[in-house]
Image: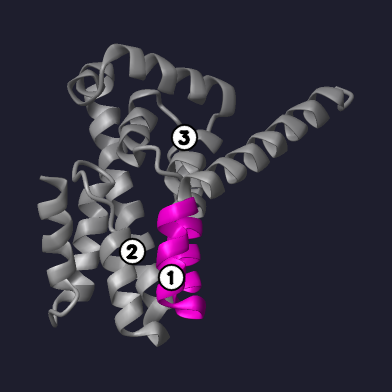
Amino acid sequence: MFQDLAQWMLEWAGSPYAVWALFFIAVAESSFFPIPPDILLIALVLNDPDRGMYLATVTTAGSVIGGGIGYFIGFWGGRPILKRFVAENIIGRVQRQFDRYGGWAVGIAGFTPIPYKIFTIASGAFALKLSVFVVMSLAGRGGRFFAVAGSIKLFGAQMVELIERYFNIGSLVLIVVIAGSAFLVHLLRKAEPV
């Protein structure tokens, strides 16, 4: 099924409506669609590298708008709606991420292969401040899509192979850096006199 959806997305790359398809796939993926827009973004940037940053902007905008839809689904539906999308044990793990990292959890999920849609819905269900959600979504999703588009623009097809091979490792390194930064900020805040 995923292979068919991915193939369908790649067929859009040659369409005059490809940018609109990219935008709507990014919106849908952030709230309910199972295939990330990266596939179409990569195909479009390979096809026209000079439009890479524009395409990353379109993808980021669509993803953050879709994330906002997910946020309000969670906000209005609460934990019961979250239970319709994910198992209770996963909800518990997501809740612990929010308790531990706050908005950073959204940024990390937005950048990595962690299903972002779970965090968009959870953000609303757990009443994360909307402004924090938007800023961290822009940072995480923008970081991801601009990194993909920029690397494809600079290195072409060789970068596609590297992304496929090492994306999870790169994401893990980024998570460690972000978590370390968050921990350092936490320690510094704790050390401040009241």
Q: Nearer the viewer, residue 20 or 38?
A: 38
Among the 4 quarters of the image, the one containing residue 190: top right
Q: Which residue is mark 3?
A: 129
Does the rendering let one see residue 132? no
Residue at 40% x, 26% y is 127
- Give me the disc on residue 59: 2
Q: Nearer the viewer, residue 49 or 69?
A: 49
Q: Tag 3 or tag 1, which sits nearer the N-term?
A: 3
User: From the viewer's perspective, is the residue at label 2 or at label 3 nearer?
Assistant: 2
Specify whether residue 163 is painted magenta: yes
Q: Position of residue 55 (x, y in %)?
A: 35, 73
- Give me the disc on residue 27: none
Residue at 50% x, 43% y is 107
- Tell me the chief SS of the magenta region: helix
> From mark 2 to mark 3, how far is it between C-alphas?
23 Å
Mark 2 touches mark 1? (CB < 8 Å): yes
Q: Please state which amino acid type lies under the numbered disc 3.
A: Lys
Q: Nearer the viewer, residue 47 or 67?
A: 47
As displayed, is residue 21 above or below residue 126? below
Q: Position of residue 16 (x, y in %)?
A: 14, 82
Q: Tag 1 or tag 2, which sits nearer the N-term?
A: 2
Q: Tell me where the magenta segment starts and ends, as one range.
A: 142-166
Q: Tag 3 or tag 2, which sits nearer the N-term?
A: 2
Does the rendering let one see residue 126? yes
Residue at 16% x, 80% y is 14
Mark 2 touches mark 3? (CB < 8 Å): no
Is the N terminus in the top left, top right, bottom left or bottom right quadrant? Answer: top left
Please rate how many residues cluster around mark 2, counting C-alpha atoms within 10 Å: few if below 14, some from 14 to 19, many from 20. many
Q: Which residue is mark 1?
A: 149
> From mark 2 to mark 1, how far is it between C-alphas?
10 Å
> From mark 1 to mark 3, how far is it between C-alphas?
30 Å
